[in-house]
Amino acid sequence: MTVTLRQRKKGDKISLYLDYYSDGKRDYEYLQLYLIPEPEKGKLTKEQKEENRKTLVLAEAIRSKRLLQIKNEEYGFRDTDKAKGSFIAYFERLTEKRRNSQGNWGNWDSVLKHLKKFTKNGASFKDIDKNWLEDFKNYLQYEAKSKTIKRLSQNSQSSYFSKVTAALKEAVKEGIIQTNPANQVEGIKADDPDREFLTLEELQAAAKVECEMPVLKDAFIFSALTGLRWSDIEKLVWSEVQHSEQSGYYIRFRQKKTKGAETLPISEQAFQLLGDRRKPEDKVFEGLYYSAWHNLKLREWVMKAGITKHITFHCARHTYATLQITLGTDIYTVSKLLGHRHLKTTEIYAKVIDHKKQEAANKIKLDL
């Protein structure tokens, strides 16, 4: 077993972490210690250099202590009393594993920030019991604030609490704890999500106006015609776009979210959006990135079409699902096209359509 002190750029700081290596396997522990990076122009001040030196000395001391504890079979995740390990450090390790999945990582990272606010002095696995989880649930529901200093939505509360219970479930699998204390606590029920989508008329109107970023427009419409998620469209390469005389055009890919292998038939119109075929390893939507700037350009584009709804890229997938059901495709087939594991996940779209029908029915009123 080796324990190495390493550094990683994290925002405007350099995070220090320990790299545990044994028998071809690696583990990480983030120390919540940070160095001040060299500025682009100029140099660090004398005081900043001294602060970095002290931080490194402290980090090295922790590294030495961990190595000694491992040898004595006393350290956290690896000792005979594994419940002494830091739950916050463990959660941070799980979060880092998801860094390549931007949306998923962002969600876990938000939970991590709230855990640190809730447990200012940290928390070991031994601290996590029914009462602790009930207290954390109350924190999410009545104290936690979003980046805009607003109370968390019910769906965020539900999602964040579920991440903590998922981490505890994973800890049981790894043998860190024997039972999951979350089994004794009722979760936070998610609110029925307001899944915004475009009508067929709105989608047609958007297709007719120009977008400052053409690749973004093409990718959005392609998603609305196929139901593909952003994560799968962003990584789509030409080798995955295939054709046969019997099946027509289709995409063979592995979902980034669920890891499931999928074969998705697509229309000829959807295929035409892709342009000229390039090398098998080339990305289909070259230059497509996720950022706040791209989200802004997406909204500006749909507004040009006279659409005032709050539209994000994921609304394209919602549009595909609702249009399929509206146009008569049975819900089981829609579920398979979307790559859902459970039919229950797809049923929300049917509920959305029923709600819209009710809204439409109530629009006609007479003065009697």
Image (tube, grey):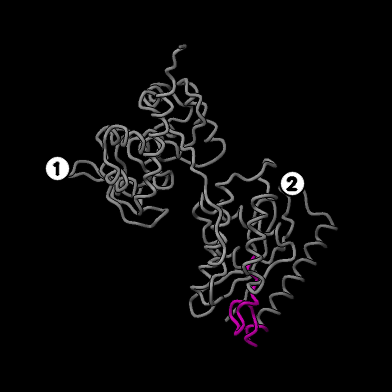
Three-letter residue code for mark 1: Glu
- Using residue 228 as the reference point, say whether residue 92 is left or right of it: right
Looking at the image, is mark 2 or mark 1 earlier in the sequence? 2
Instruction: Give 66 or 104, whichever is nearer the viewer.
Output: 104
- Using residue 123 as the reference point, say whether residue 1 is left or right of it: left
Q: Quadrant of the C terminus?
A: top left
Q: Residue 203's mark?
A: none
In which quarter of the view is residue 70 placed? bottom right
- Using residue 56 as the reference point, say whether residue 10 is left or right of it: left
State the image coordinates of residue 103 (x, y, percent, origin top left).
51, 49
Element class at badge 1: loop
Q: Disc 1 marks which residue? A: 245
State the image coordinates of residue 203 (x, y, percent, origin top left).
38, 27
Farthest bottom residue in view: 72
- Using residue 358 as the reference point, say whether residue 61 is left or right of it: right
Q: What stretch of residues is rendered in magenta?
A: 68-89
Q: Residue 41's mark?
A: 2
